[in-house]
Every structure is written in structure tokens, then in C-alpha cells.
Image (spheres, grey):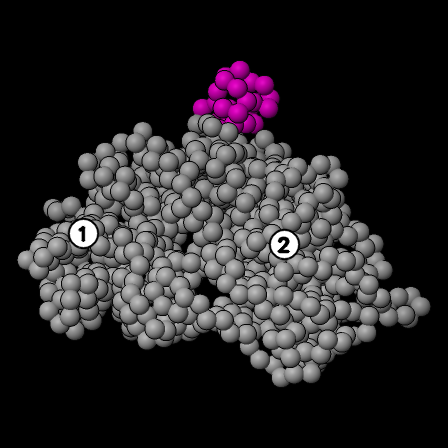
């Protein structure tokens, strides 16, 4: 038996002594009780109860009967959190052996996994938009129809928080009407759609997706409802945020190009459009917009608005321009700047002439009646097909008949397509579409566990991996009762991960777990960080998304989130990181050599480093908390009330005022006895990353102060920068993988994990460990786990969601 197997059995201490025989359970209990009494009971006695946890009297014979308490102990041990920093600690082998013993006692007991009752799970805003896309071949901006969803357990897809308010119900009803009209291209009155360029976006360079040889601007995906004329209205942006109104740019002779699906529809002289003087300096005319009216066919198109890149001469400015071109380059002598586009508004339709055969019409109109007598049969075919996909296979004849009643009402008042539009509107407000509905088998007692149906399993899988409805292949396997077969389920999981729709797992799971969504609202103070712009913000996001996505698609070990010696950069990000030889807006994979060692893994990513900083400075506390919570799964408790701010200044021996180092500020802060316990956990982590500034640039000095990145971790490990911090995290690799597993399971199930789920988490992680912790193996183990495959019968009383579904149905009928 090898050393690793001995540790898994809780025999680490005996293996360390080289013993040839296995001790009895009684001997193990006595050994581990001695360890607890020596290292833990000073704080976790009945009298002290540190952290609200008392381990006295130690009864390791009764671990399985009190799993909630001992799961807290396991988590602390696996992350090395306890005993506290500075206290006497057992050897690492004893440490691991104790944790393994407690785990084995809990895992060997009869399983009481917290299986959620079925009930209903409302689609969140992202899922709703994706479902519309896959059902109707129609891309919509769900945020234009529905409010943001509440977040719980770190994610916005948790069933318990996806409530339904009267306002949200009205939003669903309104969205259904607009989407059904847009899908069929039914003529409507002119509307306006505004698309804005981020206020801090720099437009001096090529924008990916626009033609080469262009500069700046915006690329818009827009669905045009009917064949008609549409007006493109272009607004300039007010450059300069220090009190100067300079909307036009200092550089003259710029040509604005407007494109439709890559073809030019207009070329406008910027100076003439705004009646500008040809001389260097500000404009003399009034601010106006540029209007271009263009005939466009119905359906999805790309509208591009950009400038021709005709001026490649080296800049002759006296001063070096900031990377962010919109901070203030037009109000000070010595700076010049290009004009920028602020926003584009699309108005229309005007003078509609019909509707082309759009992708959404093809998705809806599976047939067209060739005679009035064939209309209802065709409508039945259309609505049966749509209902099967929209209701994820849970469609009955009564469901189709309900939709046909609405078709008959609409067609009687107008025509065939009007009837289909009204029926589609009814379908989009059906609880079977808005909610993921799971039904338990008949004749079960309350609390009884059962396997979910194949159709329900198909929905669980598709919303986990795609944030959307199942496709035809998945539905067909479910209808054939083949999806539950472990080999088929694993095959389908890998197929779906290879599909582009699995990008939703990166955008929604990683985007929330790794806090990438916070980038949109993160705005460092421009006066302190004039080189931070929206271009860099979006590059930060894209880099981390590409790293996460590559780990899944290439089935690489999940630990490469910590160790990856490669990353993905465009020119803007490469310049920020100091990586030479990268040009253009297209991202490329680069190897991180020894000179860029600090950039390896998540710890070196600008997305993490920026969002874990304050707008004016770094924050070792936030960075330390982020690592503990998101990577190790052991967040410190919340801070006490009335925590004082960091001291802004200090005086040296000569009485001169100076800005203290971050280390000095943190040491002063930790002098408060109420703060020291948690800060001993967080601060060393944050100080190891202090050589990254508040926007993720590498530095060796903070002002005049040389940065000292050395520290001692809470387990006594000395570290001196990002490389040592990575090595520290790998010391607790098992806890890191379990934390990733727990996060995935929370996201996949749409509910939080509790102590009684932890045996399942350990089982999933152990299964992935057999394949070197590869990401796809971890995901397959999640979907093959008991909580993902099973449910339990709820209590007799209807759930809150069931009442909500009834409210939806009543409102639709009314």
C-alpha cells in the first residue's frame, strides 16, 4: 500500500513511522483524540468556543452523528487554517491523517445527502435570452426586457432567490409580445435603439470585427424587424473630462465610414459634418449628429461605424499621451487627439416593403398553408414543434390545444401569421417555458428519494452547460430513456462541452465565480491611473475567459488555474503586461517564460488584481479575502463594526510627513485586537501580491517606497511574492479542487451546498483525481453524482414557486 493510500485511510501518522501493519480503529481514535487535545482544545473548549465551535469533550467515535460540526473542522484542516497563526501545529502528515479519518467516518455512514425537492426553478435573465435564441433563432438583449436577478451563494441561477414579483410578471408579458412580433417580422411603428461606446474607451486603434484599415468606433449586432429604410444617427463624444467641451478632436481630415454587414453604405467627412474650421484647434460650429438613411432587409445584421485609419504619421505631441485617450488630451497644450464616436442610434422602420425570410421566421414557420382549409393543420404542426422545444419535451395534447385556441383568436381577427404570433406570445408566457418544472413519481412518501426523469435530466444538463434549453439530440435521447446510461451521459456531456454554446459556462459560471462581471463597474480614479481604459477592462475579461475556456476544451487539469504558464493577450494587454511582439486587436496565446513568472495562473491576471483593489490603491485585505473565499473556500468572518480607515500619512523621525507603505498601514490596522485574527489570514496573501498595482501593473516601488512582498502565511510558510503564493496554494491542492467542485455543484444544481453534500463533493473530486483532476472529468463526475441525478419528494404543502407559477398562468389567461 503506497503512502497516499495510507493517508486516505487515516494512517498518515503510522506511515510516517514506517510501520508495516495497520492500527485498529480504536488505536486511530486514541491517536487523533490526542492530536485534538494537544493542538485544538485551548481555543475550542466548552469555555472558549472560538468561532462558535466547541470540540470538548472529544468524541471521535461519534463523528458521523454530528457531521455539521465536523465538516467545519475538515474544511479548516484541509485549508491549513487551524490552529491559528503563531500557535503550535502538528506535522503536516498528522494534519492530513486527522482530516482523512474524520472524512472516512462521515463518508462511511448512511448517506443523508441534501437532495433538493423538485418544484420549479425560474429561468434567470441570461437563460431566458439563450432559450429565445435557441428556440426562435433570435438574438435578443434580455436586459432590455427583464431586470437583473438576485445573487445567492455567488450565482444568479439559484432557485431559492429566483422569485416572481408583479413587476417581473408584467415584464414577461411585455417581452413575450415584443419578441413574438420581432420573430415573425410583423410591421410595427418606428422605434429607437441606442448603442453606446463606453465613456472611457480609447478609439485610436482597430476594433476587432471591423475592416482592417479602420480605427475606433463600434460594431453593432442588430435585428431589423421588417424590410424597410432605417436611419443611422451617429453622435460624437465629448473628449476631455476636466471642464473642457471638446467633442470633435484636434486631428483634422478624418473620414467616418458606416458599414452594413461589412459593406460601406456611407463615407462622411467628419469636419464638414460638424462644420469645423480646418485650422488646428477647437470647432466653430454647433454640435450636430450625422444621419444616414439606408434600406435594410429584415433579420440580423451587423452595423459598423468607424474611421478610416489614414493617419499613420508619428505623433508630434510635446507630451507623451496617456493610454486612455478620453481622460484629457484636448484641453492642454502639447496634446492632440483623434475624434471619437460616442453612440449610434438606429431608428425605424420607415416605409416598410415586406419581410424577408429571416432565420427566426424559418425557425417558427415550419410550414405555410397553401389553402385556408390547411391553415389549422399547419398551425398545429408549428405549435407542436415549438412547444416540444420550449417546454423541454414536457408537452401534452392539452398544451397544444391551448396554443391553438390563441391561434384561432388571432387568425380570425387578422390572418394566419397573426394567429401564430398570438399563440407564440402565449407560449412564451407559459410556466412550462418560464420555469424548469420537475414532477415526482406517484405514490411516494414525503422525503423519499427518487431518480429524476430523463427529460428533467436533459434540462438539468443543458442549463448547467449551456444556460439554455436542450437541443434535438439531447431531447431525443431523453425521450428514448437512454440519457441516464452513464456512458451516454458522459458522451453527451463531452459533446456539449465541445459545442460553442458551452461558452455560457465560462461567461456565467466563471464570470461570477471569478468576479469578472465586476469589471464593468470597476472604475479606477482616472487622475491616478490615466492608462486604464475600457479597452484594457475588456482585455482583462477576455484573457481570463479564454484561459478558463481553454482548460475545459483542452481538458487540462483544473490546477492550471493556479499554475498555467501561458495566457491570452491582444496588443493592449500585452503592452500592459510588458510582453513584446504582440500587435493588433486579435487575442493570441503566449507562453509565460521566467521573466513573466508572476503572470502565471489566476494570481497574475489583471481581472483579479483590478477588481480586488480599491479605485485609488491596492488592497491586501480584499485580495487576501478573494483568494481564501474563491480559491480555498474558507472565507474569514465579516469584519466588526466601526473598523477605522487606514492611516493616510505618517511622520518620520525628523518630523517629515510621508505616505506610509501598505505594509506599515496594515501593521497599524492589525494593532486593533478585534482585527488581528482575520488579518493574519488575509494580509500575507495580499502582501505577496503587492508588487501588482491597483490595475495589475508590475512594479517594484510604491511611490518612493520599495515594496516588500515577503510575509509568513498562517501555517508558518514563508513567502516572497506570487510564485511562493502559488506554491502555497498547491500545498493545499486537494482543498482547492474540492472548492472548485463545490462551486460547480452549486451552479449545476441551482442551490447551495450544505454539510450533508460534502461526502458527494469529496466523491466527485476523488473521481476527477483519478484522471489528474482534468476539467472535463470533473464536470462529468458532477453530472453523474447523486444530487444531479436524483431528487426527493417534498412536503405536502405547495412551494412558493408553485404559487408563483399559478400566478403566471392566471395572468396569462386574464
Residue 592 found in image quarter? top right
Q: Which residue is mark 1?
A: 367
Q: Secondary structure at mark 1?
A: loop
Residue at image position (68%, 47%) is 583
Residue 330: image location, x then y, percent? 73, 73
Disc 1 and disc 2 in contact, CB within 8 angstroms: no
Residue 141 found in image quarter? bottom left
- Above or below residue 535? Residue 230 is below
Residue 289 found in image quarter? bottom right
- Mark 1 or mark 2: name the one nearer the start of the chain: 2
Foreground mark, 1 or 2, reads 2
Towards the viewer: 440 or 341: 341
Q: Secondary structure at mark 2?
A: loop
Left or right? Give the position of 436 relative to 31: left
Instruction: Look at the image and say whether residue 814 sits in the magenta stretch.
Output: no
For label 1, the crowd category at 10 Å Cα-Cα, with few meaning under 14, some 14 to 19 and many 20 or more, is few
Residue at image position (37%, 39%) is 496
Residue 522: image location, x then y, percent? 59, 64
In the drawing, what numbered circle is on residue 213?
2
Residue 1: image location, x then y, percent? 50, 17
Q: Is residue 682 visible?
A: no
Residue at image position (93%, 68%) is 654
For label 2, the crowd category at 10 Å Cα-Cα, with few meaning under 14, some 14 to 19 and many 20 or more, is few
**Residues shaded magenta:** 1-24
Towards the viewer: 558 or 594: 594
In the drawing, what numbered circle is on residue 399?
none
- Above or below residue 632? Residue 165 is below
Q: Residue furthest top?
A: 20
Residue at image position (34%, 32%) is 491
Instruction: Look at the image and say whether residue 5 sits in the magenta stretch.
Output: yes
Residue 245: image location, x then y, percent? 68, 80
Amino acid at each position: 500500500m503506497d503512502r497516499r493510500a495510507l493517508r486516505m485511510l487515516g494512517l498518515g501518522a503510522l506511515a510516517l513511522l514506517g510501520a508495516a501493519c495497520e492500527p485498529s480503529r480504536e488505536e486511530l481514535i486514541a491517536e487523533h483524540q490526542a492530536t485534538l487535545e494537544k493542538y485544538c482544545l485551548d481555543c475550542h473548549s466548552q469555555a472558549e468556543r472560538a468561532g462558535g465551535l466547541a470540540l470538548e469533550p472529544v468524541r471521535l467515535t461519534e463523528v458521523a452523528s454530528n457531521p455539521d460540526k465536523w465538516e467545519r473542522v475538515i474544511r479548516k484542516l484541509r485549508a491549513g487554517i487551524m490552529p491559528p497563526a503563531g500557535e503550535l501545529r502538528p506535522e503536516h502528515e498528522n494534519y492530513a491523517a486527522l482530516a482523512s479519518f474524520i472524512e472516512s467516518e462521515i463518508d462511511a455512514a448512511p448517506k443523508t445527502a441534501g437532495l433538493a425537492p423538485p418544484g420549479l426553478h425560474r429561468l434567470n435573465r441570461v437563460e431566458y435570452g439563450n432559450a429565445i435564441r435557441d428556440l426562435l433563432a433570435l438574438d435578443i438583449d434580455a436586459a432590455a426586457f427583464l431586470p437583473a436577478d438576485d445573487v445567492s451563494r455567488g450565482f444568479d441561477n439559484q432557485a431559492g432567490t429566483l422569485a416572481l414579483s408583479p413587476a417581473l410578471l408584467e415584464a414577461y408579458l411585455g417581452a413575450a409580445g415584443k419578441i413574438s412580433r420581432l420573430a415573425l417580422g410583423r410591421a410595427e411603428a418606428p422605434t429607437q435603439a441606442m448603442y453606446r461606446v463606453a465613456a472611457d474607451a480609447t478609439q485610436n486603434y482597430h476594433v476587432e470585427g471591423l475592416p482592417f484599415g479602420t480605427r475606433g468606433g463600434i460594431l453593432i449586432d442588430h435585428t431589423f424587424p421588417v424590410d424597410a429604410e432605417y436611419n443611422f444617427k451617429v453622435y460624437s463624444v465629448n473628449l476631455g473630462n476636466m471642464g473642457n467641451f471638446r467633442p470633435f478632436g484636434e486631428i483634422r481630415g478624418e473620414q467616418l465610414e458606416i458599414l452594413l454587414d461589412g459593406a460601406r453604405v456611407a463615407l462622411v467627412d467628419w469636419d464638414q459634418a460638424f462644420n469645423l474650421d480646418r485650422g488646428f484647434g477647437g470647432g466653430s460650429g454647433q454640435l450636430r449628429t450625422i444621419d444616414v438613411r439606408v434600406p435594410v432587409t429584415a433579420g440580423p445584421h451587423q452595423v459598423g461605424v468607424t474611421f478610416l485609419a489614414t493617419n499613420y504619421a508619428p505623433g508630434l505631441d510635446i507630451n507623451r499621451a496617456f493610454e486612455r485617450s478620453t481622460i484629457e488630451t484636448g484641453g492642454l497644450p502639447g496634446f492632440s487627439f483623434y475624434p471619437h464616436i460616442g453612440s449610434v442610434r438606429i431608428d425605424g422602420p420607415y416605409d416598410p416593403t415586406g419581410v424577408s425570410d429571416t432565420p427566426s421566421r424559418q425557425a417558427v414557420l415550419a410550414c405555410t398553408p397553401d389553402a385556408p382549409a390547411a391553415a389549422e393543420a399547419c398551425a398545429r404542426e408549428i405549435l407542436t414543434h415549438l412547444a416540444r422545444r420550449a417546454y423541454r419535451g414536457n408537452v401534452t395534447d392539452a398544451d397544444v390545444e391551448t396554443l391553438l385556441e390563441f391561434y384561432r383568436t388571432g387568425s380570425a381577427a387578422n390572418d394566419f401569421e397573426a394567429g401564430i404570433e398570438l399563440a407564440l406570445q402565449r407560449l412564451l408566457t407559459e410556466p412550462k417555458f418560464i420555469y424548469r418544472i420537475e414532477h415526482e413519481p406517484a405514490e411516494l412518501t414525503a422525503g423519499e428519494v427518487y431518480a429524476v426523469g430523463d427529460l428533467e435530466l436533459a434540462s438539468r444538463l443543458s442549463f448547467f452547460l449551456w444556460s439554455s434549453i436542450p437541443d434535438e439530440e439531447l431531447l431525443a435521447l431523453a425521450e428514448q430513456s437512454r440519457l441516464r446510461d452513464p456512458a451516454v451521459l458522459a458522451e453527451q456531456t463531452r459533446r456539449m462541452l465541445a459545442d460553442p454554446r458551452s461558452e455560457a459556462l465560462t461567461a456565467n459560471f466563471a464570470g461570477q465565480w471569478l468576479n469578472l462581471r465586476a469589471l464593468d463597474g470597476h472604475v479606477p480614479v482616472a487622475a491616478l491611473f490615466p492608462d486604464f481604459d475600457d479597452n484594457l477592462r475588456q482585455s482583462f475579461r477576455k484573457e481570463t475567459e479564454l484561459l478558463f475556456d481553454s482548460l475545459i476544451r483542452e481538458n487540462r487539469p483544473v490546477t492550471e488555474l493556479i499554475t498555467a504558464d501561458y495566457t491570452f493577450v491582444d496588443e493592449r494587454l500585452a503592452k500592459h503586461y510588458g510582453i513584446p511582439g504582440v500587435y493588433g486587436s486579435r487575442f493570441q496565446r503566449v507562453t509565460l517564460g521566467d521573466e513573466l513568472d508572476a503572470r502565471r495562473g489566476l494570481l497574475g491576471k489583471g481581472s483579479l488584481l483590478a477588481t480586488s483593489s480599491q479605485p485609488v490603491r491596492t488592497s491586501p485585505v480584499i485580495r487576501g479575502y478573494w483568494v481564501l473565499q474563491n480559491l480555498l473556500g474558507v472565507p474569514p468572518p465579516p469584519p466588526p463594526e466601526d473598523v477605522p480607515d487606514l492611516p493616510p500619512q505618517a511622520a518620520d523621525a525628523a518630523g517629515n510627513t510621508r505616505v506610509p507603505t501598505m505594509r506599515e498601514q496594515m501593521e497599524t490596522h492589525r494593532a486593533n485586537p478585534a482585527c488581528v485574527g482575520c488579518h493574519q489570514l488575509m494580509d500575507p496573501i495580499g502582501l505577496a501580491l503587492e508588487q501588482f498595482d491597483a490595475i495589475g501593473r508590475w512594479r517594484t516601488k510604491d511611490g518612493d517606497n520599495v515594496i516588500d512582498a515577503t510575509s509568513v502565511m498562517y501555517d508558518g510558510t514563508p513567502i516572497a511574492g506570487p510564485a511562493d503564493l502559488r506554491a502555497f496554494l498547491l500545498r493545499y491542492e486537494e482543498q482547492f479542487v474540492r472548492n472548485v467542485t463545490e462551486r460547480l455543484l452549486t451552479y449545476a444544481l441551482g442551490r447551495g451546498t450544505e454539510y450533508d453534500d460534502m461526502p458527494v463533493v469529496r466523491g466527485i473530486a476523488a473521481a476527477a483525481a483519478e484522471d489528474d483532476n482534468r476539467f472535463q472529468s470533473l464536470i462529468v463526475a458532477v453530472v453523474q453524482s447523486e444530487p444531479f441525478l436524483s431528487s426527493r419528494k417534498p412536503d405536502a404543502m405547495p412551494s412558493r414557486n408553485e404559487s408563483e407559477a399559478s400566478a403566471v398562468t392566471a395572468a396569462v389567461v386574464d
